[in-house]
Amino acid sequence: MRFSTLLVTSALCLTPAVYAYGVAEVTARAHADCHPDDPPNDRLIGDPQDTVATEDTCEKIEVKHGFDIDAYSVSLVDITKDTSDRCHALGIYANGECMGLPNALIPFFPGETQGESRCFKDTPFDKYLYVRLLCDADDKDKDNKDKEDGPEQPESEDAKTEAPEEPAAPAASAASAAPADKPSGGNDLLSSLGL
């Protein structure tokens, strides 16, 4: 517990250095008699475990297992004020890489500084819950992509307008050749029908 307090304090000291970056304190709890999708109850088993989650790291939280534990719940509190503006959710994973779809989510909206999950099953998790903030890409990256894509876009549009013209010429020559063949085939068809 003392280490996590030290970690949170150091993260708070770095807050000006990570402006416009998602950072949140995450707390995991084990519950008795808390069924999946129910709000977390007060029947806690063991002490809550804390960590600091970011958008670039996959942090682990040690959890306990036992017959008396029915579910886990996770809560978060923003450390930087931009967390809820840039990030949409906290993903909770059963794998150490935080890859794929999360096993549970804590959604949050701009302006919210805290969030809490409902109870979720303990079965997919082994020794740890792995957490990561799910955030938008940096606005600077979006601007750079737009600048890179901007000049290429008109070139591709020019290529698109030229492309139909080239096939149109062969199609026209094929169409002019086809009517010469069709009258005999068309007349044969019409005569076979008696028209």
Image: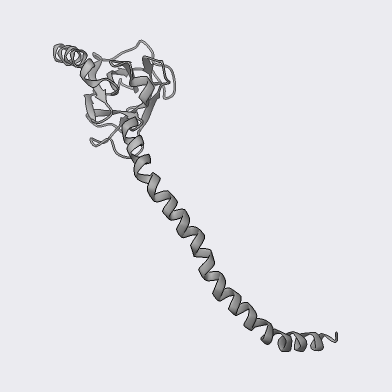
Residue 72 vs residue 79, the one in the foreground: 79
Does residue 120 appear left or right of residue 158 in this picture? left
Does residue 74 appear left or right of residue 166 in this picture? left
Which residue is farthest right?
195
Residue 10 position by quadrant: top left
> Residue at 38% of width from left, 40% of height from top?
146
Where 133 falls versus 165 (above or below)?
Answer: above
Colouring of the image:
one colour
Where 112 falls versus 150 (above or below)?
Answer: above
Residue 68 position by quadrant: top left
- The spot of residue 155 in percent (x, y) is 42, 54
Residue 25 position by quadrant: top left
Where 174 falls versus 112 (above or below)?
Answer: below
> Residue at 38% of width from left, 47% of height from top?
151
- Asked if residue 65 can be seen in this view, the reply is no
> Residue at 35% of width from left, 23% of height from top?
71
- Asked if residue 141 can be seen in this view, the reply is yes
Where 68 falls versus 98 (above or below)?
Answer: above
> Residue at 32% of width from left, 38% of height from top?
144
Residue 38 vs residue 23, the one in the foreground: 23
Residue 118 vs residue 14, the one in the foreground: 14
- The spot of residue 8 in percent (x, y) is 20, 14
State how many labels appear.
Answer: 0
Does residue 43 appear left or right of residue 180 in this picture? left
Residue 172 vs residue 107, the one in the foreground: 172
Image quadrant containing the C terminus: bottom right
- The spot of residue 179 in percent (x, y) is 68, 82
- The spot of residue 175 in percent (x, y) is 63, 77
Image quadrant containing the N terminus: top left
